[in-house]
Image (spheres, rainbow, N blue to C red):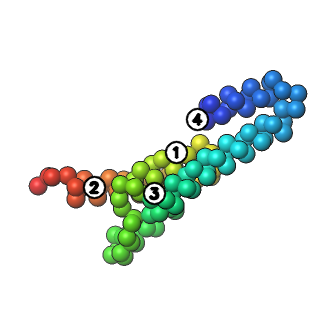
Amino acid sequence: MIEWRDTVIEYIFHHNDNSLPLGWLFCFAWAFTLASIGSYLTITIGPGANGSGIAEIIAVLNGVNYPGFIGWGVLFCKCLCVILGICASLCIGKEGPLAHIGAIVAYMIVYYLPIK
């Protein structure tokens, strides 16, 4: 998605007379659209996916009850919204969300797979 965005911006800069404001407008619209989709998904599907995930993992491991922190919706939302946020050029880290995704996958393996 980032390569496609760069290709479109390059096309705008090389094929239009008034290219600078139009290029910036496209960048703003692209980032706003992807961030809005990610925000909407986080609010509606997986509210436990907000934030980095590291502090919440530490709290859960220390015995704090955090309902809605682990689930299929949170896993889907966290995976998709991290991708959308990075493609929107937001300043987010990948380490915290990846730790949260790993914790959800580990929980699913331990409690949902029929392994004895």
Q: Nearer the viewer, residue 76 or 55?
A: 76
Q: Tell which circle, 2 or 3, labels the residue nearer the N-terminal end.
A: 3
Is residue 5 depicted above or below 51 in this figure?
A: above
- The mark nearer the N terminus, 4 or 3, is 4
Residue lying furthest right: 17
The alpha-carbon separation of the residues under discs 3 and 1 comes to 16 Å
**Element on which disc 1 rests:** helix
Q: Residue at x 47, y 63 (%)?
A: 47
Give the label, 2 or 3, closer to the camera.
Answer: 3
The label number, if any, that marks residue 108 in the structure image: 2
User: Helix, strand, or loop for circle 4?
Assistant: loop
Q: CA distance from mark 4 to mark 3?
A: 23 Å
For mark 3, what is the residue? 45
- Position of 68 with respect to 21 (left or right) is left
- What is the crowding at mark 4: few (fewer than 14 residues within 10 Å), some, or many (at least 20)? few
Q: Position of residue 51 (x, y in %)?
A: 52, 62
The residue carrying mark 4 is: 1
Mark 3 surroundings: few (<14), some (14-19) or many (≥20) residues within 10 A = some
Q: Does the residue at mark 4 contact the one at mark 3 (Cβ under 8 Å)?
A: no
Disc nearer the start of the sequence (3/1): 3
The label on residue 83 is 1
The residue positioned 35% from the left and 54% from the top of the image is 72
Q: Nearer the viewer, residue 80 or 105?
A: 80
Where does the N terminus fall, quadrant-wise? top right
